């Protein structure tokens, strides 16, 4: 019995039968007592007795004349049948009790009264059983039809969801027009499918964009090396190596950003520290040349220092890339810490101010190497702000021609559960170390697109609180690259 429809019907039928059966039993018991009383009343006889004889009193209250001076007394007699509700007995053998004595009854009158009483009770019992069966059957059919009608939309939803796969995520379940639990269930399922569809589309777009961004420097690197190998005698090898290292550096930076985005998407902000946001902002600004700082003192927020430093660093990288002559950073405390990064560059059209936070989004159509990064900086910055229960948005720059990025970080975030322990040494640390940039080049002619963060901050950003075992000293890698 796996069908919910059958289970509900059986349950309703059993409950109805029990309730009607209990009520019917009480009614039959009351009917039995009533029939016994009626039989006793109808069979009751009154007598006036003397020493010689007993004379029956007529229904009009008159009795035979009694000689004067005779001692008389009154007596009564009645029949009380012993009736059975179940099982039925032979009505002609219904037992009974004779209350009082009557010499004129040879048993036929009492048995006849008892048989008639039992027959009346049997008829009442059969009538009640018929009513019980009829009502129970009616309830069963009604409940079965009602449950079938109620569950029909659920079955339609189930059938529709069973047809949905990764190739047709646009399909949605039918939602009933009535405002009830089934309709709300359908609406919730459609909202869940919408979120899944957006997540899958974002993943597909992310994979496509990442493949495109990785393919371009790889293709350029391969072409440069193939041309150089085709004409080794005519090749300016220092120039070839310089270009190859530039492409490798771009690949390294892009891969590091992709790994960081994957980590930000997969992990929750489990462990938080109290971060002096003022110190973080001043440290980032001190490494920049054209940035003006306006900051409150001792703005404390819960979170990860490395991630907040990366958020501000990405905003400053974007501002310096597009600014004309000035970049202003403002930090204000309060219920939520507010970081403003303002530049006097060309600005961002209002229609594109939300789109710039999408991954691999760049407003330049050429997507050239000189145009800047791969379009991940602002996406990473917003993801970090979101992980800290904050926001990041682009607005008009008051007093500037450019754009203003405003990041808000709440200063009273409740502390979540403790993070699980991460092993100190993990498989593949050498690859992570190379991708993160701990193995740095000694070629002075390789350009640096931006000041490199300190190793401990970068490792904390990528690996959390546990950097690889050889990240600080790099002894193993020095021996392999010597």
Image (cartoon, rainbow, N blue to C red):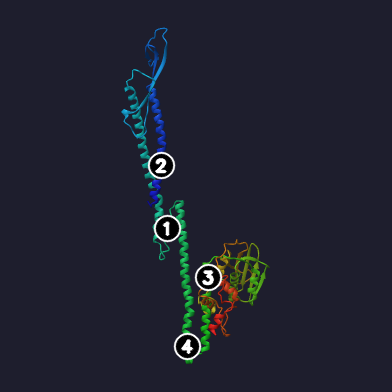
Identity of the residue furthest to the right in this view: 297
Lower position in the chain sequence, tag 1 or tag 3: 1
Q: Position of residue 221 (x, y in %)?
A: 48, 82
Q: Can you identify the residue that label 1 sits on?
A: 173
User: Tag 4, which secondary structure?
Assistant: helix
- In space, the residues marked 4 and 2 are separated at their CA atoms by 91 Å
Q: Position of residue 57 (x, y in %)?
A: 38, 15
Q: Can you identify the residue that label 4 sits on?
A: 228
Identity of the residue furthest to the bottom in this view: 233
Given this view, does label 4 or label 2 mark the residue nearer the observer? Answer: 2
Bin the neighbour count of mark 4 within 10 Å (Cα to Cα): few under 14, some 14-19, many 20 and up: some
Q: Can you identify the residue that label 2 sits on?
A: 16
Given this view, does label 1 or label 3 mark the residue nearer the observer? Answer: 3
Given this view, does label 4 or label 1 mark the residue nearer the observer? Answer: 4
**Quarter of the view holding residue 344:** bottom right
**Quarter of the view holding residue 171:** bottom left
Lower position in the chain sequence, tag 1 or tag 2: 2
Lower position in the chain sequence, tag 3 or tag 2: 2
Lower position in the chain sequence, tag 4 or tag 3: 4
What residue is rendered at 33% in x and 19% in y?
A: 105
17 or 278: nearer the eye?
Answer: 17
> Is residue 347 among what the camera can see?
no
User: Tag 1, which secondary structure?
Assistant: loop
Mark sitting on residue 261:
3
Bin the neighbour count of mark 2 within 10 Å (Cα to Cα): few under 14, some 14-19, many 20 and up: some
């Amino acid at each position: 019995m796996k069908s919910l429809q059958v289970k509900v019907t059986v349950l309703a039928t059993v409950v109805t039968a029990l309730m009607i059966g209990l009520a019917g039993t009480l009614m039959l018991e009351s009917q039995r007592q009533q029939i016994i009383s009626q039989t006793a009343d109808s069979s009751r006889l009154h007598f006036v007795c003397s020493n010689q004889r007993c004379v029956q009193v007529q229904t009009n209250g008159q009795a035979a004349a009694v000689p004067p001076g005779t001692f008389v007394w009154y007596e009564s007699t009645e029949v009380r049948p012993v009736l059975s509700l179940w099982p039925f007995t032979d009505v002609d053998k219904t037992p009974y009790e004779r209350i009082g004595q009557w010499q004129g009854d040879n048993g036929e009158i009492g048995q006849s009264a008892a048989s008639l009483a039992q027959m009346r009770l049997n008829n009442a019992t059969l009538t009640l059983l018929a009513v019980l069966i009829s009502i129970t059957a009616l309830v069963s059919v009604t409940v079965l039809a009602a449950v079938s009608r109620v569950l029909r939309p659920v079955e339609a939803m189930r059938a529709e969801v069973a047809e949905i796969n990764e190739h047709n995520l646009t399909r949605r379940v039918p939602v009933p027009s009535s405002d009830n639990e089934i309709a709300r269930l359908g609406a919730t399922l459609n909202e869940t499918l919408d979120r899944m569809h957006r997540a899958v589309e974002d993943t597909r777009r992310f994979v496509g964009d990442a493949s495109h961004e990785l393919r371009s420097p790889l293709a350029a690197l391969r072409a440069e090396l193939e041309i150089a190998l085709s004409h080794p005698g005519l090749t300016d090898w220092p120039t070839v190596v310089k270009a190859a290292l530039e492409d490798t550096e771009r690949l390294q930076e892009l891969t590091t950003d992709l790994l960081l985005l994957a980590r930000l998407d997969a992990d929750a902000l489990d462990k938080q520290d109290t971060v002096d946001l003022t110190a973080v902002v001043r440290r980032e600004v001190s490494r920049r040349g054209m940035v003006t700082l306006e900051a409150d003192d001792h703005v404390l927020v819960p979170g990860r220092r490395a991630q907040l430093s990366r958020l501000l660093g990405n905003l400053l990288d974007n501002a310096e890339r597009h600014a004309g002559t000035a970049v202003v950073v403002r930090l204000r405390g309060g219920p939520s810490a507010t970081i403003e990064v303002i530049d006097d560059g060309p600005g961002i059209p209002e229609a594109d101010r939300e789109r710039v936070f999408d991954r691999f989004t760049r407003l330049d159509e050429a997507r050239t190497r000189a145009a800047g990064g791969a379009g991940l900086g602002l996406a990473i910055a917003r993801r970090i702000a979101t992980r800290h229960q904050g926001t990041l948005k682009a607005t008009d720059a008051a007093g500037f021609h450019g754009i203003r990025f405003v990041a808000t970080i709440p200063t009273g975030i409740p502390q979540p559960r403790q993070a699980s322990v991460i092993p100190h040494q993990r498989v593949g640390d050498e690859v992570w170390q190379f991708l993160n940039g701990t193995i740095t080049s000694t070629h002075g002619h390789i350009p640096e697109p931006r000041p490199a963060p300190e190793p401990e901050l970068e490792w904390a950003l990528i690996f959390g609180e546990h950097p690889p075992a050889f990240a600080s000293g790099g002894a193993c890698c020095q021996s392999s690259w010597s």
